[in-house]
Image (cartoon, rainbow, N blue to C red):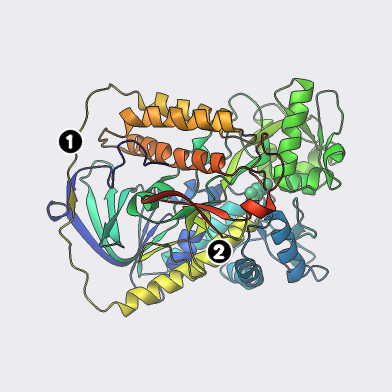
Amino acid sequence: MKHQPDFRRYLVSFDASSLGQVFTDTLIIGAGIAGVRAALEAAQQVRVLLLCKGTLDESNTWHAQGGIAAVFDPDDSLQAHIKDTLLAGGGLSDEKVVDLVIRSGPALVQELVRWGAAFDRHKGRLALAREGGHSASRIVHAHGDATGQAITNCLINRLKDQPAIRLMENTFVVDLLSDQDRCVGALIAQPGKELTIIWAKRVILAAGGIGQMYRETTNPPGATGDGYALAYRAGARLEDMEMIQFHPTTLYVAGASRTLISEAVRGEGATLLDHSGYRFMPDYHPDAELAPRDIVSRAILQQMAKTGRANVFLDVRHMGPKKFRTRFPHICAMCESFDITPGKDLIPVRPSAHYMIGGVTVDINGQTSLQNLYACGEVAATSLHGANRLGSNSLLEGLVFGKIAGEHAAQAAQRQTRRLAPLPLGNSITPSHKTRLDVPDVRNSLRSLMWRNVGMTRDANHLAEAIEIIEFWSRYVMDKVFDEPQGWECQNMLTIARTMAAASLARQESRGVHFRSDFPQSDEKNWRKHITFTVNDPLSQLGK
Ligand code: SIN
């Protein structure tokens, strides 16, 4: 497979010597759980600059409802959590990584408690919820269904006490800077200001996910896949880009922008009904509503097709309105704002894009394939989740790998005693004016295309068509030079959409979240391996 049409190393023209310059030991891009945890760790050793695309309350972490998975129940065990994670991963998880993350979980969650995270308690102990694919109750949560906010607030408070960390919000990273195959910093844009160069000894990418690539998503508007595109253009390896997880239950009401209804609701006994009131999940899996997410999502899709309807319903009437409001206050308020009273009314739901399992390849230290560049959180592919992620294992991964990446990047930065000096980097592009572009229209068209052709059920014809259309759009979008985030995001989305479609086409089997209707079975002999991309080797396979 060839490069994307008009592939460019940098999206804009610049001359480093004529721009404002900032110097730091460790630059961290993204301020969700992974980025902030990395910053707190790195700041124990070196100066840190933490960048946030929007504000601290716009990350995927902030929106997390369910919680963070860790073993606290005396009847549960680390082995059981490891086994569940490996089982869900469908043969693509790395056992060493799974072991490391699961074993590190309880201590790091306790650390959050010491730092002031107000997790819910029951009889003095952490209250634990159940989610799909977990064989025990091990989901730590806060304010019922606002775990992400509680964790973010705790980490933000902690940040304030750290003089070594400088935070810059509303900062868009246009590109990573590289020189002789190593990452040396980033080119940033802030509203109303000239571009600025940041020179850094080490860079940690923690820029979150890609949900906005799909018409229907649980993710906030900022999740446009920028981190993946930054790393790819800079030469880092991506992997598992076909592994996109769809969450089974998002509110399906016009105007509700696909708000998540946490899996923890099913953990409390909610059932799924079709339009005739039939509970269909037992027909699809012995664990019914608590089967792994890919199974529940596909079952909903099949039931929608069978009944010719655009949604199914979540039934929480067994809880009654009062109990539901106490356990899930935010979900309840959100449903009520659309005149739905959970506990009395059925909640209309359907699946939508939720989490990118693949991403920038990292090793056990969070190091990417590009020297000096680390990654953690959703943007990183650690091989914890394999081909399918268990609910609430992602905040855990962000916490564990945030700490690891922060520690290793800071140690490496400290070892580099040579002072940072500006490099003579630059780039010149002649802008093309050949088309008058309606950027929002391209973005919306791409999101619809991805939903239709690279969604929960895929086949060769639709995937090949998606690649052809993405390449066609890319020809007149990638040759432009934009001066604001909407245009850059659109270019990032096209770049990464193509890798997602190409990887999905290449994997001629079904495994975990990747379902091919033309290859409905797993192919252990040929496909128990990862699909990787780099700019110089756009599609290859890696047995890890
Ligand atoms: C949920 O609350 O269902 C989402 C949790 C997750 O995706 O890990």
In the foreground, 80 or 536: 536
Residue 278, placed above or below residue 529: above
Extreme residue toward the left, this view:
18
Q: Position of residue 386 (x, y in %)?
A: 62, 56
Q: Position of residue 117 (x, y in %)?
A: 60, 63
User: Residue at point 31% right, 28% down?
Assistant: 476
Quadrant position of residue 438? top left
Extreme residue toward the front, this view:
525
**Location of the N terminus (image quadrant):** top left
* Disc assigned to residue 399: 2
Residue identifier under label 1: 430
Give the mark, 2 or 1, whose residue is nearer the N terminus.
2
Quadrant position of residue 277? top right
User: Residue at point 49% right, 57% down?
Assistant: 380
Distance between the Cα atoms at labels 2 and 1?
43 Å
> Crowding at label 1, few (<14), some or many (≥20) Cα neighbours within 10 Å?
few
In the foreground, 506 or 70: 506
Q: Position of residue 360 (x, y in %)?
A: 46, 55
The residue tagged with tag 1: helix, strand or loop?
A: loop
> Crowding at label 2, few (<14), some or many (≥20) Cα neighbours within 10 Å?
many
User: Residue at point 78% right, 44% down?
Assistant: 266
Amino acid type assigned to the residue bearing label 1 in the image = Thr
The answer to whether residue 514 of the structure is visible from this angle is yes
Residue 538, placed above or below residue 474: below
Residue 146, placed above or below residue 157: above
Q: Is residue 540 left or right of residue 2?
A: right
Residue 382, placed above or below residue 510: below
* Disc assigned to residue 525: none
User: Residue at point 15% right, 58% down?
Assistant: 424
In the foreground, 3 or 495: 3
Q: Position of residue 544 (x, y in %)?
A: 56, 63
Amino acid type assigned to the residue bearing label 2 in the image = Leu
